[in-house]
Image (cartoon, helix red, strand yellow):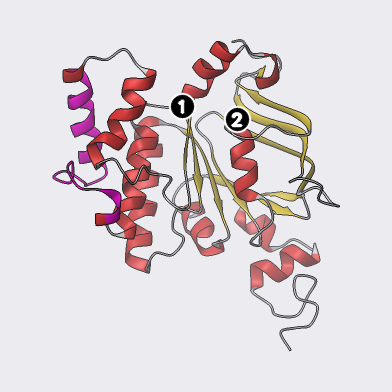
Amino acid sequence: MSFDVNENEVLKADKISFSFGDAARPLLDGLSLTLNRSEVLFLIGPSEMGKTTLLKLLTGLYRPSKGEIFLQGASLETLSKAEKKLALRKISMTFQRSGLFDSKTVAENLLFPLQELTHLNRKECDLLLQKVLNQVDLTGTELRYPFELSGGMQKRLGIARAIVLNPEIILYDDPTAGLDPMTSNHILELILNVHREKRTATLIATSDLDLALRVSAQVSSKICFLYGGKMVQEGSGAELFQSKDPVIYQFFRGLLDGPLNPGGGQ
């Protein structure tokens, strides 16, 4: 695949819209987003605004009703089934609710994509399995099942499965949701280590503003604010904090009164 316009762009949503069923209003409405090579990009905004849906569109799990998704310059709509399968090996996603196979052990969860999508022999798969488990501090859990792991361990296993194919792009769906502060910090450090070591293009969807601002303090990153089916504004944490948009102003300051909650919590 070749880049049509900007070879620094690895993933792009171009004026996409998406609705579930016969919904009166689209969940996403003419939305555009660009993720560049080796970039850390946050997709942030209130809950239930379509962040997870957008990630699934970007990974080809959903198809937009309008607009196009481009992966390294090629529209997913123009690729054959075989070409699309090959292209999507370059992108991985972690799911908010782990997305793991409950009936498979830790080792089986990691071996599954290796056996399905690579030509590695069993010895090579086992060596890679041990390397990835060591990266996420899960060595010794190979024979355990996901339900036997803590929430934080399940998140780390999800990250292990995301990186086992050595993707160029990783999308994280609310990676610290439901975790205590110490475990959240552990997951955050793991995400940053993966980014630093592999230089992956990284997109993190979250409602956790503190998470985005903490990362911004450690690595150069950008924040895209999603609301009402559109990208309202894009920029650094400092730029969005100074935004005059009433929705962003309220969200960044945690105010009760404003367009996100007209009743002011009364």
Pinpoint residue 136: horizontal percent, then vertical percent.
Answer: 27, 44
Amino acid, disc 1: Glu
Mark 2 residue crowding within 10 angstroms, few (<14) / some (14–19) / many (20+)? some
Viewer can see residue 223: no
Which residue position is annotated with label 2? Answer: 60
At horizontal 78% and vertical 34% (from top left) the residue drawn is 65
- Residue farthest along the bottom direction in this orientation: 266
Q: Earlier in the sequence, mark 1 or mark 2?
A: 2
**Mark 1: few/some/many CA within 10 Å (<14, 14-19, 20+):** some
> Which residue carries the number 1 mark?
168
Q: Is residue 179 above or below residue 16?
A: below
Please state the horizontal and vertical placement of residue 7, each as a whole percent of the image.
Answer: 62, 18
Cα separation, mark 1 vs mark 2, equals 16 Å
Q: Is residue 76 above or below residue 256?
A: above
Q: Say left or right for 90 vs 68.
A: left
Mark 1 vs mark 2, foreground winner is: 2
**Residue at the extreme front:** 103
Given residues 261 and 100, the one toward you in this image is 100
The magenta stretch is 124-147
Q: Residue at x 37, y 21 (%)?
A: 116
Q: On the rendered image, what quadrant is the C terminus found in?
A: bottom right
Label 2: element kind: loop
Helix, strand or loop at label 1? It is loop
Q: Nearer the viewer, residue 77 or 230?
A: 77
Q: Is residue 45 magenta?
A: no
From this viewpoint, which residue is outermost toward the left?
A: 140
Residue 182 x/y as whole percent:
32, 65
Residue at 79% across / 82% down in the picture? 263
